[in-house]
Image (spheres, rainbow, N blue to C red):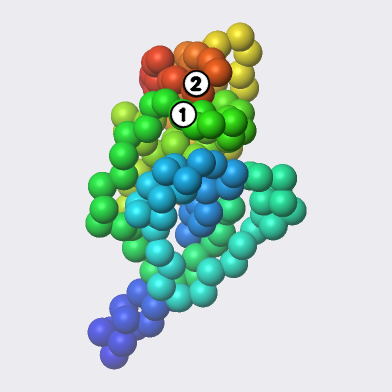
Amino acid sequence: MKKYAVILAAIIVVFFIPKSYISSPGFVDQQTAQDFEASKPRCIGFSKLTNAAEMAADAPGKSLCFGWLVKSKAAAPTPTTQENTGGARVMDIDTYVRMNISALSPIKEQLGGTFQATSIKTDNGTGVVSYEDGHNAYTADFTYLMTDAGIAIESFTVRK
């Protein structure tokens, strides 16, 4: 009987406690979109898009996974520069940090969580980002450079 209770508890945890993840990259160049598709997590179960209105304004898609969230085995690139190739729009720094927070953070996600930026403040080449993975929350200071060629993150330091 105890064995069945444990199995039932595991099913409830896996399927009824949603896990948040980035489900689409928003408005980015083709290479960044391909890199995202190669490394994005998959939801085995039911997935619910939570920010359809923001996506209409080129924001990354955020979804909740009711099921098992599986991270891609493909190693995600560590993007530090967003190139502007032939007249394409370069994304703003907030979008860039939101999309790349997992690669930028020196701390890795815990227990299958996925980092989500909860707050970003930028001004004159410096910024502060608060982010969490559903288990732990962090705040980091970063410096960046925006040029016609794109965005370069020059430093990213997690506060203690």
Identify which amino acid the numbered label 2 is placed on. Answer: Ala
Residue under label 2: 149
Location of residue 135 in the rendering, given as x and y in whole percent from the top left corner: 42, 46
Residue at point 61%, 18% (across, down): 122
Q: Quadrant of residue 67?
A: bottom left
Residue under label 1: 83
Helix, strand or loop under label 1:
strand
Residue at point 49%, 32% (across, down): 85
Evaluate whether residue 121 shows in this view: yes
Q: Quadrant of the C terminus?
A: top left
Q: Quadrant of residue 11?
A: bottom left
Identify which amino acid the numbered label 1 is placed on. Answer: Glu
- Give the CA separation, mark 2 to mark 1: 5 Å
Location of residue 157 in the rendering, given as x and y in whole percent from the top left corner: 39, 18
Label 1 near label 2: C-beta < 8 Å? yes
Vertical position of residue 157 compared to residue 120: above or below: above
Total tally of numbered discs in the picture: 2
Q: Nearer the viewer, residue 145 or 4?
A: 145
Residue at point 63%, 13% (across, down): 123
N-term mark: 2 or 1: 1
Location of residue 113 in the rendering, given as x and y in whole percent from the top left corner: 39, 51
Vertical position of residue 1 compared to residue 30: above or below: below
Residue lying furthest top:
124
Helix, strand or loop under label 2:
loop
